[in-house]
DNA sequence: CGAGAAATTGAGGCCAATCAAGAAGTGTGG
DNA sequence: CCACACTTCTTGATTGGCCTCAATTTCTCG
């Protein structure tokens, strides 16, 4: 768990794509000025997501719904630097439940704070929009997979996606081992499979010498080779920033607002 | 096919959510000032989507990829008022193919034009962002479905989604019959099923008295009841606009730009 | 009217779900 | 440090639904 109070997971992530100006950085840091801490495997009884959003500073969080047939479906897993609630931004109310998968630190901020960004920084707005479009492309990749592909392929793709998302924050160029604080049951509910199938798939991937998984630690033995085999598209490294507006901040009232 | 040159499908759609000012309307109309027409069932050899986006003014379009195993996967179907290419906005290049499902009219505009919107109208930017987030929520609904649900349920949900999307443009309060210019093969490729399964599912839905499908015309006999049965979430009617910035247009250079 | 595309219907095989039981891992209090 | 309860993971046998292959009928449009 991150201990540095001044650390901003959003700034780290956004800085990956564009060089943030001081003003832009302030706008982002403004969203992470408060902190909440929670233990692992607890349900978050957050206020309605129509009022607040939550930046994940550290730890893993997931959102799910209970279906009428008794099954549970995990809709999305949130990693550090991602914003819980953004997906429901357009909705007036959300009926998803939220749980922590590990010890977490999150920063709540009111939806209204997004207005600051949209009103004052066209460039940040554009990046925020582009990141969301990228996440949409990833969702489409998942839909591309899910259509009756063999379970082993689905799981392998899922692991590759986690790998790609985590690598943004890793400074290790040979990044192939990471912790996944998820039970196989949660993974199953994410992918629309059963824990039995997930278990079998992992054994097979292991005996095929592709991915080993034990005690919540995953190792992809040859990430590049596996990506090629599965035609996996690593979306996270490529955002087209060529058409972005300049970084000038609109309106002179800005400085006073964030002060 | 829409014949009125001044008709803007974007304005119609956006006006559903907020009352557009004159300036905002001009910004949107600016995206639809050119027109291209294509016949049904043709492949669109458009310029790379990294440069241009396309507003669908009339007709249906779909994008797909050919998978290595010989299967085809339809990634998304575009209806009037939707923008082809927005999903790849963040990508530097896109390798999806595009086909028309019916006779279509589309309006190309350069990606740079989006910058105008982001730079000059925070309120439109926010709406554009919210609509994209709504589409993301819909994608998640599809993922929620696709996890090993019975084929009949998947198909029924798909039909309900089309119904909800089309209703935005229909002024019929008792909207239950509409044309779907898609073959069962295309539907199958959209949902990750086979044409055989789609056919069987439609027969069953028909004999259950829920949905009838013949000659590309769908009738949902009791939309509200079916929505309830399937716990279908109609996302399209509810966008939370409460936190939107005011409609003022930034920068005095705006009027000259769109003149 | 005729040819090609699309939809229907049927038989057989395969993969993941389900059900079930046992093993391994995790956390707690004595 | 161990004992105990609980969760998670593994392994096996059976079942069911969708895919595949294939033949026929219906639709569409020049």
Image (cartoon, coloured by chain):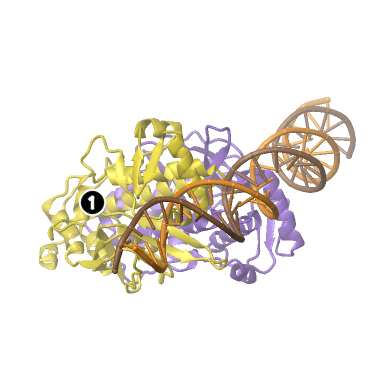
Chain colours: A purple, B yellow, C orange, D brown
Picture quadrant where residue B63 is located: bottom left
- The residue at which mark 1 appears reads as B123
Query: Is B118 situated above or below B177?
Result: below
Subunit that carries the residue with mark 1: B
User: Depth check: B53 or B114 in front?
Assistant: B53
Q: Is residue A101 visible?
A: no
Q: Is residue A171 visible?
A: yes
User: Depth check: A180 or A95 in front?
Assistant: A95
Picture quadrant where residue B173 is located: top left
Give the residue displayed 40% in from the left and 34% down from the top.
Answer: B227
User: Depth check: A195 or B157 in front?
Assistant: B157
Residue B183 pos. (x, y %)? 40, 55
SS type, badge 1: helix
Query: Is A164 situated above or below A194?
Result: below
Give the residue displayed 36% in from the left and 32% down from the top.
Answer: B224
Residue A61 pos. (x, y %)? 54, 45
Mark 1 neighbour class, 10 Å CA radius: few under 14, some 14 to 19, many 20 or more: many
Residue A77 pos. (x, y %)? 53, 48
User: Depth check: A210 or B165 in front?
Assistant: B165
Residue B247 pos. (x, y %)? 18, 49
């Amino acid at each position: 768990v991150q201990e540095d109070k001044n650390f901003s997971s959003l700034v780290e992530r956004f800085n990956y794509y564009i060089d943030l100006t001081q003003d832009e950085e302030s706008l982002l840091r403004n969203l992470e000025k408060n902190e909440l801490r929670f233990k692992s495997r607890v349900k978050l009884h957050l206020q309605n997501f129509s009022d607040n959003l939550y930046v994940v500073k550290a730890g893993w969080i997931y959102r799910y719904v209970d279906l009428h047939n008794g099954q549970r479906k995990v809709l999305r897993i949130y990693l550090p630097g991602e914003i819980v609630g953004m997906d429901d931004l357009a909705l007036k109310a959300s009926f998803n439940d939220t749980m922590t998968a590990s010890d977490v630190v999150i920063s709540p901020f009111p939806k209204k704070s997004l207005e600051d960004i949209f009103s004052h920084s066209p460039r940040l707005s554009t990046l925020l929009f582009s990141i969301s479009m990228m996440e949409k492309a990833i969702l489409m990749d998942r839909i591309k997979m899910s259509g009756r592909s063999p379970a082993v392929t689905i799981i392998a793709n899922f692991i590759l996606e986690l790998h790609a998302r985590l690598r943004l924050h890793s400074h290790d160029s040979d990044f192939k081992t990471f912790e996944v604080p998820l039970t196989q049951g949660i993974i199953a509910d994410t992918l629309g499979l059963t824990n039995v199938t997930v278990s079998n798939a992992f054994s097979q991937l292991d005996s095929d010498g592709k991915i080993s998984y034990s005690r919540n630690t995953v190792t992809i033995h040859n990430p590049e080779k596996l990506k090629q085999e599965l035609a996996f598209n690593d979306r996270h490294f490529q955002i087209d920033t060529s058409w972005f507006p300049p970084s000038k901040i609109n309106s002179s009232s800005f400085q006073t607002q964030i002060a």
